Amino acid sequence: MNRCFIFGALKVSCLPIKPESGDFIIAADKGYDTALSLGIDPDLAVGDFDSLNRIPDAENVVTLPVRKDMTDVGYAVEKGFERGCAEFIIYGAVGGALDHTFANVAIAHDIARRGARALLIGEEYSFTVLHGSSFTFKARESGRISVFALGGTAQGVTIRGLDYEVEDCSIENTSHIGVSNAFVGKEATISVREGELLVVWQTE
């Protein structure tokens, strides 16, 4: 699977998932400094650079206007799709300004609808969106995990390996029944047959 790593402006102290040879690495605006602080040299830097306050000294730079119809992270995602990426690991994009966190969850939603996978990895919480698909967590995960329906009713929801398990249930997008589940030290899988689920869990 072709992977795209995107670095946003927020602090990143560790990388639970690390880039490997062949991955496409993009810095979005101040995410350029974020990547450099982790010893990562991005393949591409994009943005209006209003947060970075300079044009990056990078080999490949796309400078965007301040007034535009998408965020810098959103533009980075489009560049990843142009490269044929099917998985997007996005750091430094959740946990700061609430409006930008919501915007990045919306971006993850769009990625899922386009048949790819997005992981938004924050310092405290991480997010993914399932669109008629499943996601498996390794046994080492700990802490809380919640699921919420997006855009309508999520049907055929199955949760295995967590404290609360369900088989083939439906969750309305007005329901909070999926809040505050927990990892129990074993492999866990969440799946949805039809519709979409937002999955939120505590970052290790």
Image (cartoon, rainbow, N blue to C red):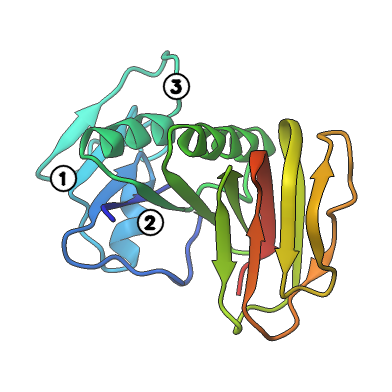
**With respect to residue 3, does 159 lie above or below?**
below
Dot 1 alpha-carbon crowd within 10 angstroms: few under 14, some 14 to 19, many 20 or more: few
Q: Earlier in the sequence, mark 1 or mark 2?
A: 2
Mark 1 residue type: Asp
Find residue 186 and report its image quarter: bottom right
Mark 1 — residue?
A: 57
Instruction: Mark 2 and mark 3 in contact? Answer it, CB < 8 Å.
Output: no
- The amino acid at mark 2 is Thr
**Point 69% across, 79% down: residue:** 142
Indicate left or right for 113 with 37 as reference: right
Residue 80 on image: x %, y %: 28, 39
Earlier sequence position, callout 2 versus callout 3? 2
Image height of 124 relative to 27, above or below = below
* Residues at circles 3 and 1 in contact by the CB criterion of under 8 Å: no
Can you identify the residue that label 3 sits on?
A: 70
Which x, y percent locates residue 191? Answer: 64, 55
Disc 2 secondary structure class? helix
Give the spatial CA distance, label 1 vs label 2.
14 Å
Q: Which numbered tag is attached to residue 34? A: 2
Figure quadrant of residue 81 = top left
The answer to whether 166 appears left or right of 7 in the picture is right
**Which-is-in-front pick, marks 3 and 1?**
3
Circle 1: element type: loop
Confirm or deny contact between disc 1 and disc 2 (CB under 8 A). no
Measured in 3D between alpha carbons, the distance from the residue under mark 2 to the one under mark 3, in whole angstroms, is: 21 Å
Which of 121 and 162 lies nearest the eye of the viewer? Answer: 162
First in residue order: circle 3 vs circle 1: 1
Q: Amino acid at mark 3?
A: Met
Please say whether residue 54 is visible from this viewpoint: no
